[in-house]
Image (cartoon, rainbow, N blue to C red):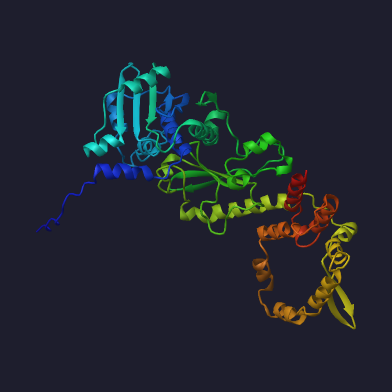
């Protein structure tokens, strides 16, 4: 006896609603263009050109390659939305979901036209026009080459084997100087995302008539770069390669080096994981949402290269845009361990920059704020009146009142309570470490204290240097010195 079939009904999505929704996948211009370059690489292209027109009435963006091109049947399949992400693909195929060409393009423009010539010279054309789908309320792709597309193809000299992807009705990109600026900024990002292809001679990438050079995010040619070597991890038959790198301190970088190591947001935003999928960089910075890790000034030199094969997409939760990933849970503990060690090494580069060699002279130069005084067999703690900052305040207007306030604070220090708290805490050492102020909090405190210093340049600089030698700022000489140098440059 077989079970009865369940009651059911057909609920096809409305094409006019779904195609508008597909525009909200979260693409920005660099990731959208990168998806198209992926397709070109998969088609064997050696040269890819991004061209555009910023004319107000007819703005367009085109991506043209010299790859294998597509037959009529292949183009029809490429313009169909979605495919099985588990299907086997060629080793060089950087796609997976069968959505990139369409969703990336339509996220930036309302009309997508693809022209492709195969080895036989046959031209195939297909266009998705959002307004046409809305009007017809069906998934109807246009198969005829319109006059404007033909004119643009002729202008770009699209005559040989390859593919031309054309965006028109660029409602998300605008026109004029705004479009030009965004294309140029996207080109900078593409030089990073495809830096391995470019530096190894596998790809020539042109944007707006300029050939891009590879942007090396690790500054491997710099003598002060710390390459920590490669570690491999195995997961479900796939090999993952991890390579932690610590960049040189910013003071050792030329302007060109700093530009190579930066991007939108500067080095602060570019720290963290660099995840590659088939040599294509899909994540350029950030800490993958791992617990306890966030961007900070002391860790901005830390960069961890992670290489995953395309077949590991589902295990690493690679999204449709190929811009976010998440490590498999079984590998997370080791990856976190490597990342924490890397962050600590970055912090040490700053901590030890300019740190004096320990010795008697150095201890004398350290500007302590609190002093221990033995009186009648007990310890008392007083504010160091010879500290340059304290001395400057006391010698100024209202100094007597300030000195009186300091004496009141000194007499009110709960020494016994502090000692009792330390003695009764079984985990005193651990608690002290956990409750210690964050580096960023200490740096913020240093900046705030600078606002109260005198405006006169000479006295101000001397007091800034004196403050840098005081606890807790003396623990981070490199970071503190950067702030002082920044303040000094503002004065000049």
Task: Report the residue that reaches farthest toward the left.
Answer: 1
Q: Is residue 398 visible?
A: yes
Tell me which residue sits at (74%, 53%) in the image: 480
Q: Is residue 117 visible?
A: no
Camera-side residue of 161 and 130: 130
Quarter of the picture containing the C terminus is top right
395 lies left or right of 32: right
96 lies left or right of 350: left
**Is 370 located above or below residue 449 in the figure?**
below
142 lies left or right of 100: left
> Toward which corner of the image does residue 398 lie, by quadrant?
bottom right
Measured as percent of width and height from the top left, residue 448 is found at 71, 59
User: In this figure, what is the number of numbered marks?
Assistant: 0
Quarter of the picture containing the N terminus is bottom left
186 lies left or right of 425: left
Measured as percent of width and height from the top left, residue 146 is found at 30, 23
Measured as percent of width and height from the top left, residue 389 is found at 83, 62
Measured as percent of width and height from the top left, residue 337 is found at 58, 55
Tell me which residue sits at (57%, 56%) in the image: 293
Task: Report the residue that reaches farthest toward the front.
Answer: 397
């Amino acid at each position: 006896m077989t079970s009865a079939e369940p009651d059911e009904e057909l609920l096809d999505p409305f094409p006019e609603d779904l195609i508008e929704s597909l525009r909200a996948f979260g693409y920005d211009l660099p990731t959208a263009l990168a998806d198209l370059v992926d397709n070109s690489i998969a088609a064997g292209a050696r040269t890819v050109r991004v061209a555009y027109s910023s004319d107000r009435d007819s703005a367009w963006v085109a991506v043209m390659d010299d790859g294998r091109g597509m037959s009529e049947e292949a183009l029809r399949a490429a313009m169909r939305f979605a495919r099985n992400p588990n299907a086997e693909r060629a080793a060089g195929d950087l796609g997976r979901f069968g959505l990139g060409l369409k969703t990336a393009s339509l996220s930036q423009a309302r009309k997508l036209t693809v022209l492709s010539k195969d080895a036989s010279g046959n031209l195939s054309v297909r266009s998705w026009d959002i307004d046409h789908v809305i009007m017809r309320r069906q998934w109807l792709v246009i198969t005829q080459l319109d006059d404007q597309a033909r004119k643009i193809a002729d202008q770009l000299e699209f005559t040989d084997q390859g593919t031309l992807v054309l965006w028109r009705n660029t409602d998300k990109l605008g026109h004029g100087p705004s479009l030009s600026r965004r294309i140029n900024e996207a080109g900078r990002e593409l030089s990073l995302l495809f830096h391995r292809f470019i530096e190894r001679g596998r790809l020539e990438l042109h944007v707006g008539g300029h050939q891009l050079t590879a942007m090396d995010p690790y500054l491997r040619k710099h003598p002060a770069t710390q390459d920590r070597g490669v570690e491999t991890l195995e997961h479900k038959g796939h090999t993952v390669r991890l390579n932690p790198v610590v960049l040189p301190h910013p003071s050792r970088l030329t302007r060109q080096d700093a530009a190579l190591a930066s991007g939108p947001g500067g080095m602060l935003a570019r720290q963290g994981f660099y995840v590659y999928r088939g040599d294509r960089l899909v994540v350029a910075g950030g800490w993958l949402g791992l617990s306890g890790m966030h961007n900070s000034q002391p860790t901005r030199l830390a960069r961890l290269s992670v290489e995953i094969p395309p077949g590991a997409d589902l295990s690493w939760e690679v999204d449709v845009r190929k811009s976010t990933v998440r490590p498999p849970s079984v590998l997370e503990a080791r990856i976190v361990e490597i990342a924490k060690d890397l962050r600590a090494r970055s912090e040490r580069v700053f901590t030890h920059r300019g740190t004096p060699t320990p010795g008697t002279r150095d201890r004398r130069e350290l500007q302590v704020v609190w002093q221990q005084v033995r009186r009648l067999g007990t310890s008392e703690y007083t504010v160091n009146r010879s500290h340059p900052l304290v001395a400057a305040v006391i010698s100024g207007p209202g100094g007597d009142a300030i000195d009186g306030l300091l004496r009141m604070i000194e007499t009110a220090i709960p020494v016994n309570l502090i000692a009792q708290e330390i003695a009764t805490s079984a985990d005193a050492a651990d608690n002290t470490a956990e409750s210690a102020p964050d580096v960023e909090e200490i740096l913020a405190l240093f900046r705030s204290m600078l606002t109260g210093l005198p405006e006169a340049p000479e006295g101000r600089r001397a007091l800034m240097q004196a403050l840098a030698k005081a606890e807790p700022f003396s623990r981070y000489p490199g970071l503190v010195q950067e702030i002082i140098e920044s303040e000094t440059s503002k004065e000049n």
